[in-house]
Image (cartoon, rainbow, N blue to C red):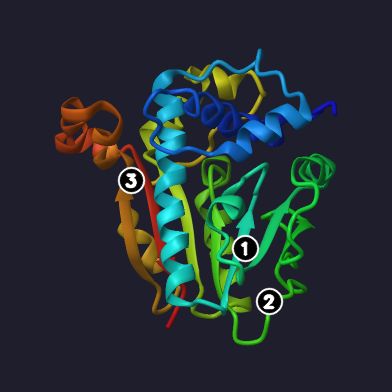
Amino acid sequence: MAVDLTGVSETLLIPLYAQWRENRRRRPVLQDPKVDEIVERLGVSFAKFMPSAVERILIVLRKKIIDRLVADHLRRHAGRAAVINLGCGLCSRFDRLDDGKVTWIDIDLAAVEPIWHEAFAGHDSRRRFVRGSVEQADLFDTLAVPQGGVPIVILEGVSMYLSEDKMRDLAARIAARFPGATFVFDILASWIARGSALYPSIAVTGARFTWGLDKPKTVESWGPGWRLIEDVSLARHLNAVYGPLGWLGRLNPVLRSAYRVLALKLGR
């Protein structure tokens, strides 16, 4: 199947490539055989994408951190958990974490839909794809979450293409539809976001980073009673990849603030 995407949508191939390469490391931080299956099924060519080793590792660490947050949510709310995966691309998290009970909704643009259905042909009925944009005002109005369901909403690898105003609006719409939901997203420091043209894997798609956040705690001011319940620096996990050398990243305050995963509780 030809994968014909442009701009931000095309960036969905970058994490696919990062994990495909990670699967081939002798000691992968995260093993994901579903990605190999997707690559083979779609016949994807990665010739256009040459993310650096550091970029690839950060993508895999980000996946691993978000996996832990989602897995914790599934354990705490077994039988009632719902996952809403915004800008899902070809994310295979369901295949890694499915507990046999979760309701899972993957959301992305219409251009991604046929590729998603091909990549995940024969997927479980508890998982479905919904066409939509994170900037769409009525995106959450018709999402079918079972009565009593407890949602966790993921936005992975997308915030840096938005703006603070758009992120605040998105969080407010999630809170209005799912009061008390947990919103998980990754953020770059502003100095990293300003240098997106320096990342070849991004530049070749024509996409550009447009937003970064330097003080994660400020997200609590986005809504009444909102609480930052997780603030995880990717640098704190570099030792999982680089061994003792990774501790240098854990100790360096600049690296610790460069890239983070946040979990924001949208009310009680």
Which dot marks residue 145?
2
Asked whether 80 or 28 is in front, the reply is 28
Looking at the image, which residue is at 64% across and 18% down? 204
**Label 2 crowd (10 A; few <14 / some 14-19 / many >=20):** some
Q: Secondary structure at mark 3?
A: loop
Q: Position of residue 37 (x, y in %)?
A: 68, 34
User: In which quadrant of the rendered view does residue 131 lie?
Assistant: bottom right
Please tell me which of labels 1 and 3 falls first in the chain.
Answer: 1
Which dot marks residue 143?
none
User: In which quadrant of the rendered view does residue 52 lie?
Assistant: top left
For residue 191, side relative to residue 134 (left or right): left
Looking at the image, which residue is at 37% across and 32% down? 191
Q: Position of residue 115 (x, y in %)?
A: 80, 39
Q: Secondary structure at mark 2?
A: loop
For residue 231, side relative to residue 194 (left or right): left
Quadrant for the C terminus in the image: bottom left
Please tell me which of labels 2 and 3 falls first in the chain.
Answer: 2
Q: Which residue is mark 3?
A: 214
User: In which quadrant of the rendered view does residue 201 lie?
Assistant: top right
Q: Are marks 1 and 2 in contact (CB under 8 Å)?
A: yes
Q: Amino acid at mark 2?
A: Val
CA distance separating discs 1 and 3: 26 Å
The answer to whether 265 is drawn above or below residue 161 in the figure is below
Q: Position of residue 9 (x, y in %)?
A: 71, 36
Asked whether 34 or 93 is in front, the reply is 34
Q: Amino acid at mark 3?
A: Asp
Looking at the image, which residue is at 54% across and 51% down? 96
Q: Amino acid at mark 1?
A: Ile
Q: Secondary structure at mark 1?
A: strand
Q: Which residue is mark 1?
A: 84
Please tell me which of labels 1 and 2 falls first in the chain.
Answer: 1
